[in-house]
Image (cartoon, rainbow, N blue to C red):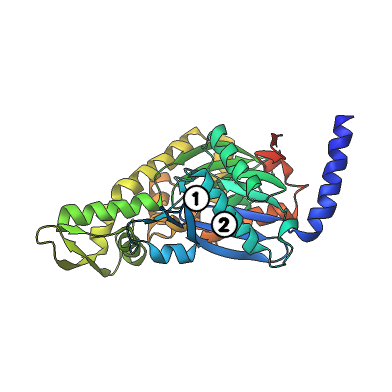
Amino acid sequence: MRTHVQAWQKYLSDQVFGRFSQDIGIDLGTANTLVYVRGKGIIINEPSVVAINQRTGQILAIGKEAKKMAGKTPGHIVVTRPLVDGVVSDFEVTQQMLRYFIDKAHDNGLAFLRRPRVLIGIPSGVTEVEKRAVMEAALNAGAREVYLIDEPMAAAIGARLPVIDAAGNMVVDIGGGTTEIAVISLGGVVAARSLRIAGDEMNEDIIRYCRDEFNLLIGEKTGEEAKIAIGSAYPQREQLTFPIRGRDLVSGLPKEVIVNDEHIREALSRSIRIIVNSIKTIVEETPPELLADIMQRGIILAGGGGLIRGLDKLIANQTGIPVRMMEDPLTAVVRGTGIVLDDMDQLQEVLIVEQRGGSLR
């Protein structure tokens, strides 16, 4: 009887709220949040950043507007990331951020009827508590139903890999907070690693290197700009240079240093070495039959970190497996969520768990 009541409630909910809401796929990243709306495509790509007035507790800005404030605020205004290493570190702020993105995704005026089904990509290594935190935040932000999917699975689907088939597919997704490495077959993850070393850690590597080598104090934004401009994992044919400006730790005055790609490569070497060694470990753990498929198909690189020059060549040399960068790697996960939403019945088995009205299923 209870099952019939629940089914009837779901039908009514879908009929009422489904008419005014569109299914939403979210890549809830440490650095950026991307939102896919069914029937519209990717409509939001904004930093996962929130500006808060600590005196009043009021949220002043979210996304791009908040990121503009970073490093430029008075003492009582804090610009923060509510997600650290791909997981929720501040529940209330994450909830507010999700509500902002869900509301922004719906351009109609019926705010009280915006109750979409939401599919969220999360790191493969998160705990049950961390999963529940994401789901509760989405439900409190206005979602009708919440589904979760492993980020490497979503990236593989976004790359149009045949994840449901009995064949090996290997994905390396280097995001802002985590690096996800996974071997996928028959709609499930066969072997995986989730590293808390990714784009943000690389930015910190560059900051530390400038401090130690040049006595130069720089901010995270400058470190990221240097990484994007001349970051590499393999020697380049032509030397690349980039001006880095900061504060001289000796004199306390402004200072500019011209760094080249070799400097940045040295700064990034530790993080890249850890990522490559983890990829080799997963290759060693992969069953031989699946490894044969991966040898033929190659390793797929996704995420912003995959854009570091020569990284694909370095991984190929270290593993002996061809490596290819997927098209538009920054949107791999959110495109995957969109494909799943468009064919939820066929791809139901790739989901981790569903939460409806506070109950896990």
What is the residue that sits farthest to the front in this orientation? 56
Q: Are the residues tagged 2 and 1 within 8 Å (C-beta)?
A: yes
In the image, residue 62 above or below residue 239: above
User: Percent from the top left, x then y, of residue 86?
Assistant: 48, 46
- Residue in the foreground of this view, choosing between 52 and 153: 52
Mark sitting earlier along the chain (2/1): 1
What is the residue that sits farthest to the left in this orientation? 251
- Type of the residue with mark 2: Ala
Q: Residue at x 24, y 51 (%)?
A: 208
- For residue 81, the mark is none
Position of residue 305 in the picture relative to residue 167 (left or right): left
User: Percent from the top left, x then y, of residue 140?
Assistant: 64, 46
Q: Quadrant of residue 71?
A: bottom left
**Can you say which quadrant of the picture contains the N terminus?**
top right
Instruction: Identify the residue position indicated by label 1 in the image.
Output: 173
Q: Quadrant of residue 148?
A: top right
**Cα–Cα gap, marks 2 and 1:** 9 Å
**Which element carries disc 2, helix, strand or loop?**
helix
Position of residue 348 in the picture relative to residue 70 (left or right): right
Instruction: Identify the residue position indicated by label 2 in the image.
Output: 332
Q: Quadrant of residue 35?
A: bottom right
User: Percent from the top left, x then y, of residue 144?
Assistant: 72, 48
Badge 2 crowding class, 10 Å Cα cut-off, few under 14, some 14 to 19, many 20 or more, is many
- Type of the residue with mark 1: Asp
Residue 86 seen in the current view: yes
Badge 1 crowding class, 10 Å Cα cut-off, few under 14, some 14 to 19, many 20 or more, is many
User: How many numbered dots are placed on residues in this image?
Assistant: 2
Q: Residue at x 18, y 63 (%)?
A: 247
User: Percent from the top left, x then y, of residue 330?
Assistant: 51, 60
